[in-house]
Image: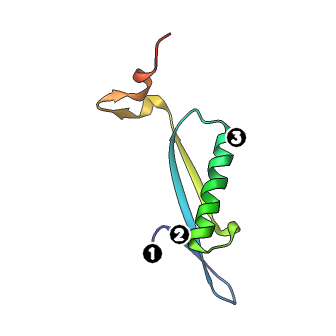
Amino acid sequence: MPACCIVENKYQLQVMPEITIELNEGRSIEQKRALCKGITEVVVATCKVPVDRVVITIHETQLVNKAVGGVLFADHLPTA
């Protein structure tokens, strides 16, 4: 079973989908709220689970700690 938690109650087992999002730093809290809301809606509709069972974790990475093509993301920023 994919990364999830199983909560046992007297009626049935409830699967708690866990979603992990990897983002570069810099998104506002409003953007993160909107992202989590939208993802939760899709998971509820697709996986047929209650909204309070969807767990989302956002991992933010500083641009100095991530590279593409051997160049740090921080070095891709415009210098103006």
Instruction: Residue at the far top: name it.
Output: 80
Residue 66 horizontal side relative to residue 18, left or right: left
Q: CA distance from mark 2 to mark 3?
A: 26 Å
Residue 27 % position (x, y): 60, 36
Q: Secondary structure at mark 1?
A: loop
The one of 26 and 39 positioned closer to us in this rendering: 39
Q: Secondary structure at mark 3?
A: helix
Q: CA distance from mark 1 to mark 2?
A: 7 Å
From what the image shows, is residue 10 above or below residue 65? below
Residue 51 horizontal side relative to residue 26, left or right: right
Q: CA distance from mark 3 to mark 1?
A: 32 Å
| Foreground disc of the pair 2, 3 | 3
- For marks 3 and 1, the one nearer the N-term is 1
Q: Residue 1: give its label.
A: 1
Residue 51 % position (x, y): 69, 67
Whether residues under marks 1 and 2 lie with C-beta atoms below 8 angstroms apart, the answer is yes
Whether residues under marks 2 and 3 lie with C-beta atoms below 8 angstroms apart, the answer is no
| Amino acid on which the number 2 mark rests in the picture | Cys
Residue that mark 2 sits on: 4
The one of 36 and 10 positioned closer to us in this rendering: 36
| Amino acid on which the number 1 mark rests in the picture | Met
Q: Residues within 10 Å of mark 3 (few under 14, many from 20)?
A: few
| Amino acid on which the number 3 mark rests in the picture | Glu
Residue that mark 3 sits on: 30
Residue 67 % position (x, y): 36, 33
Rendered residue at 65%/41% (across/down): 31
Residue 7 % position (x, y): 62, 78
Q: Residue 42: give its label.
A: none
- Which quadrant holds the N terminus? bottom left
Residue 25, by quadrant, is top right
